[in-house]
Amino acid sequence: MSREQQAVQQARKAFLTGRSKPLDYRIKQLQNLKQFIKEKTTDIANAMRKDLHKTANATQLFEILGLEGEINLAVSKLAEWAAPRPVNKNLLTIADDVYIQPEPLGVVLIIGAWNYPIAVTLQPLVGAIAAGNAAVVKPSEVSSHTAKVLELLPLYLDPEMYQVVTGGVPETQELLRQRFDHIFYTGSSAVGKLVMEAAAHHLTPVTLELGGKSPCYIDKNCDIRIACRRITWGKYMNCGQTCIAPDYILCESSIQDKVINEIQKCIQEFYTNDPKSFADYGRIINQRHFKRIMALTEDSTVAIGGDSDESEFYIAPTVLRDVTPGSKVMQEEIFGPILPIVIVNDLKEAIQFINEREKPLALYVFSSSKKVIKQMISETSSGALVANDCLVHFTISDLPFGGVGNSGTGRYHGKYSFDQLSHLRSCLIKKLNMEGVNQMRYPPHTTEKLRWARVLLLKQVNLARWRQVAQVATLAALTVFVVQVRCSSKWVNVVNKS
């Protein structure tokens, strides 16, 4: 039996004991996960520095804070999320208990990514633990130093229920041959297709958090300085290796030069005149990705940057101007610090350009016009749309994070993680009485029975409204009773006086 088979088998055996179902157990595991983050902060920071040239503060800001927020939210809301959820009834089921009961799926496989190897690996784990599942965690082997830190998770969590499997492609392939109850994958669309294909063998549901080319439209009627400031931050954070980073800019030719000038000012402000020596500017993860990114710029005009150093996997913050749709850089997700500018004549052409391509994970629009923003919302499709900022929707736990079409399937964050990794079980509990009401469903099927069925089945009962009516009726009855008592008391007093 392979190491991967053993891990899955042990996780399933632990799950079948039922010990992950009580909420106290889940909360304890979540608290232990938070303890892991706290005690291994230095180790995590050192690993991230080696893997991606991230500073300790950047690691806290972009990896740890959001994860801690997810854990705190899950602990505080778990009882509410896991409780039965009443639903509206029809007249036929008015006397029955009808509700949705969230229950654990079983064993979840979580395949993490290398660009934010703590956040995108452990945030799904928060959802898996909260929902009462067992889990097998597969960190990305590309961010190898961080993967070694994640190997320590079983020292803090239930080591039988929560397994960590490290390794490369062969180990991942072996894991995908096993039967899971859900697979949660973060990474490229190409690998996402392979994961989905493997999952189909066992009819295993999947969550695919992928990526794509996220467009950024700049309307000429906006504050271009502020727009470029926010775009520069969103694009070059983590050296452009962010799945929701703006992939390219769409704007009219009349503002292209101003956009380039403003972005150049921001690069100098954020990263100084020497980004290579600046601590908060990252590096490309490895040589393969370095060469891939550099090759994308070969047939385009560099307006800003363009410098590189293969020995350090360094690529300067770069802007390409007058990029054509057929350019190399427009054929795939860049996932690096290269920002192409594509010229469009107006909003209509920008929308057409976006709609002719795969649906992106995020779409950004910068405009002072509510009409322009609403038009972009109504006439395009994407995993998320953000107006006048970049990336910040990822920080909001009440917003579902996920793609559509080629950019992914499924969603997570906050309660959405819990629901995504739960089976929402439909429950209807009847009593063995009131059999007369059921006569309409038994043969023979007469016209009169059909008439009653139409009334009882098609009339929906809104429970909230029903309770309001009941409260009003109770209050009215109580009022009548009080009035009657008072009148009776007055009548008694009159009789006594006479």
Image (cartoon, helix red, strand yellow):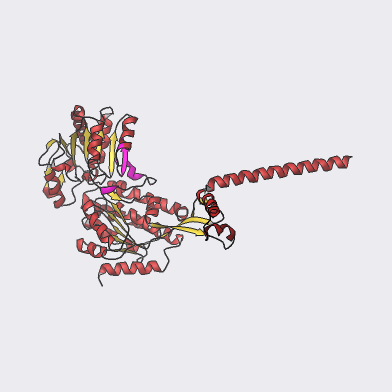
204 within the magenta span? no
Which residue is depicted at the point 26% across and 67% down? 4
Residue lying farthest to the right in this orientation = 498
Q: Locate the C terminus by quadrant.
A: top right
Left/right of residue 194 with respect to residue 122 in the rendered view:
left
Q: How would you classify the magenta stretch by its main secondary structure?
A: loop
Whether residue 106 is visible here, answered yes or no, is: yes
389 within the magenta span? yes
Residue 329 spot, x, y in % from top left? 15, 42
Which residue is depicted at the point 36% across and 47% down? 400
Residue 327 spot, x, y in % from top left? 13, 40
Whether residue 188 is visible here, answered yes or no, is: no
Q: Is residue 19 above or below residue 410?
A: below
The residue segment tinted magenta is 379-406
Which residue is depicted at the point 12% across and 38% down? 300
Which residue is depicted at the point 18% across and 48% down? 284
Residue lying farthest to the bottom in this orientation = 1
Q: Locate the N terminus by quadrant.
A: bottom left
Left/right of residue 301 with respect to residue 456 in the rendered view:
left
- Comparing 110 with 468, the one in front is 468
Q: Quadrant of residue 174?
A: bottom left
Q: Quadrant of residue 6?
A: bottom left
Q: Quadrant of residue 328?
A: top left
- Comparing 268 with 24, the one in front is 24
Left/right of residue 494 with respect to residue 281 in the rendered view:
right
Residue 142 spot, x, y in % from top left? 20, 56
- Comparing 10 with 495, the one in front is 495
Residue lying farthest to the left in this orientation = 298
